[in-house]
Amino acid sequence: MAISSVQPVVPAGLEPFGRWFEKTFRAFAANWGVWVLQSLIYNAAAMVVVVVGAVAIVATFGMSTLTGLLNNRHPAQLPSIPTSLIASAILIGVLTLVMIWAVATFLQAGMNATAVKQLRGEPIAVADIFSAGYAFWPSLGATVLCGLLTFGALLLCIVPALFVWPFFFLLYPIIVDRRQGAIDSLAMGYALVKQNYFLFFLYGIVISLLGAAVSAITNMIPLLGPLLAVPLMLVIVPITILARAVPYVDICYGSQTQFGFTGPVPYLPPAYTPTTGSGAMPSAPPAPETDEPHNSATFTWKNPDAR
């Protein structure tokens, strides 16, 4: 097995801060139609699941109430709600939340794949939101692991929990691009982020504040707020997705990509392989040349489509 190594470049200091934001908004502006339609599909799918769950709960209570009224010998008194009905409503609510989580995970994986694809210089389409089925289970597992790690930090103290989440920042772009599991992706994300933790911490805070600002603006405007919320959410969701993908592509592909200013490159997604395997390994693209000080981490590359 021929293994090629590469050193993803993690810049030192805060120099990439503005550059990453600039690339994020440039990428969105370059294909805003695709991103808005993908965001519309994402939000509409979640809303459909919510409506179906709500209708199921209302129908369950409605049928029970109607049956109770028909069988009630004292019409002035409302029939009591049986415990089994309450349990059924709770079960429907839980299943609705699980379905929302599953649908959101599947579609977010597709949007993450779209972001990495665009930033590598490849054309994207609205249908790409459905293209990352291979990343569904790893993404689902990664979400569970992140929740458990954050909960563990909360048990220790609230301060550690606030400092844990930056290590998850590159997680989902790594999963969709390298086509690997949650644990390996967490390990690689941690290895990269720890080299310039403060940069990722500040960058993530600002990304989070963008969503908070949208919520605050819509809540401050009495009548137009709810109307503005929809178009603003159609924009903020893809910008958040792109903002996570830009650092990953910038670190692992660098100047080879369109948004590194040199044009598209062939699709050769890298894979971090902490364990041995088999199959031919393609040559890794060279690390981007830069005069700025940087840190580096060594990983191995393989073709994820090779069996």
Image (spheres, helix red, strand yellow):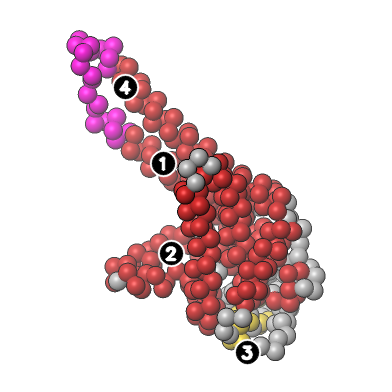
Magenta stretch: give its range.
68-88
Up the image or down, 301 lies above or below 98; here it is below
* Place of residue 101 in the rendered image (x, y in percent of width and height, measured from the top left): 47, 49
Residue that label 3 marks = 293
Q: Earlier in the sequence, mark 2 or mark 3?
A: 2
CA separation, marks 3 and 4?
69 Å
**Residue at figure coordinates x 20%, y 16% from the top left:** 77
Q: Which mark is residue 64?
A: 4
Using the image, tell me which numbered label, if any, was put on residue 146.
2
Circle 2 — which element?
helix
**Is residue 266 found inside the magenta-colored segment of the image?**
no
Are the residues flagged by discs 1 and 4 in contact, CB closer than 8 Å? Answer: no
The residue at the point 61 percent across, 44 percent down is: 41
Q: Amino acid at mark 2?
A: Cys
Q: Residues within 10 Å of mark 1 (few under 14, many from 20)?
A: some
Q: Is residue 25 above or below residue 278?
A: above
Q: Residues under labels 1 and 4: Cα distance? A: 20 Å
Q: Rounded to the nearest whole Å, what is the CA distance between mark 1 and mark 3?
A: 50 Å
| CA neighbours of label 4 inside 10 A, class few (<14), some (14 to 19), many (20+) | some
> N-terminal of the two: label 3 or label 4?
4
Q: Say the numbered circle drawn on residue 59.
A: none
The amino acid marked with disc number 3 is Pro
- Per the model, the C-alpha gap separating discs 2 and 1 is 21 Å
Q: On the image, numbered disc 1 is attached to which residue?
A: 95
Q: Nearer the viewer, mark 2 or mark 3?
A: 3
